[in-house]
Amino acid sequence: AIKRKTAPDLRVRKNGEPIVMLTSYHAHTAALVDKHCDAILVGDSLGNVMHGFETTVPVTLDMMILQGCAVMRGSRQALVVVDMPFGSYEGSKEQAFQSAVRIMKETLCGAVKLEGGARMAETVAFLSERGIPVMGHIGLTPQSINTLGSFRAQGREETNWAPIENDARAIAEAGAFSIVIEAVAEPLARKITQSIAVPTIGIGASAACDGQILVLEDMLGLSPRSPKFVRRYGNLGPAIEEAIAGYARDVKSRAFPGPEHVYEMKKS
Ligand code: KIV
Ligand code: NA
């Protein structure tokens, strides 16, 4: 049997070979991502991608667990990290523990991720000390859209650096095994990467980060819109539409199904 990567396996990649990460929410994409990535994030971006919500706020623990199970079934070697959704962990460290335990017991994933800096440090320590590897997430934290007001890059003025640096330090010192840095000015993401002991995973951050992550559907060109920080490695949207149009054409002209797709009578 192939041994799955663990949170400690990622933790030791600080200043090593860059950590390759993508999101996946379902079995068949997880199997493909698994072939080339160290870790798979079952992100709460599934709210946008799968369900068409405008934010991640409506995503529930049940939704995360259902898709976490699918990704675990579809993958073999990558560490699977499941996002804790809005409202499942901010109330108290005990609430966070209960939610994380549900995720870990029901999906058998190897780690959880939660958003927030210094304010979440106590919670990160509480979980980490109790057998739950935690990936942090700082900079732009989409679950806070309603207090932030908009999805904007953080730290683009040096006067705003200190709280973000403090967030990274607090989460790292609390025991997070790695930290996602999202939509943060490049020099700040670089500085944070150089100043904390755990690997940073960048998204809209810096090539200097210890790893990178993107939303799979964004990099495949399947999402109708995607942020500035996405490089499109595929153009699946038009490819899928072309296939669907071809099918529609063939159904209307009765070119599909062909003789090879239908069942003949058994020879008696
Ligand atoms: O939900 C998600 O996909 C994420 C990544 C963008 C880091 O949190
Ligand atoms: Na997320």
Image (cartoon, grey):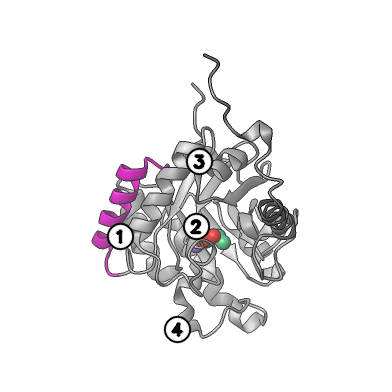
- Which numbered disc flags the more N-terminal residue, 2 or 4? 2
- Which numbered disc flags the more N-terminal residue, 1 or 3? 3
Beta carbon at label 3 within 8 Å of ligand 1 = no
Kind of residue sitting beneath label 1: Ala
| Left-right relation of 245 to 45 | right
Q: Position of residue 113 (x, y in %)?
A: 44, 56
Ligand 1 sits in which quadrant?
bottom right
Kind of residue sitting beneath label 2: Gly
- Which numbered disc flags the more N-terminal residue, 4 or 3? 3
Query: Against 199, is 95 above or below?
Result: below
Kind of residue sitting beneath label 3: Leu
- Residues under numbered marks 1 and 3 in contact, where contact means CB atoms less than 8 Å apart: no
Question: To which residue does mark 3 refer?
Answer: 79
Question: To which residue does mark 4 refer?
Answer: 147
Question: To which residue does mark 2 refer?
Answer: 43
Does residue 157 belong to the magenta stretch?
no
- Which numbered disc flags the more N-terminal residue, 2 or 1? 2
Number of marks in the rendered image: 4
The residue located at (65%, 65%) in the rendering is: 189
Beta carbon at label 2 within 8 Å of ligand 1 = yes
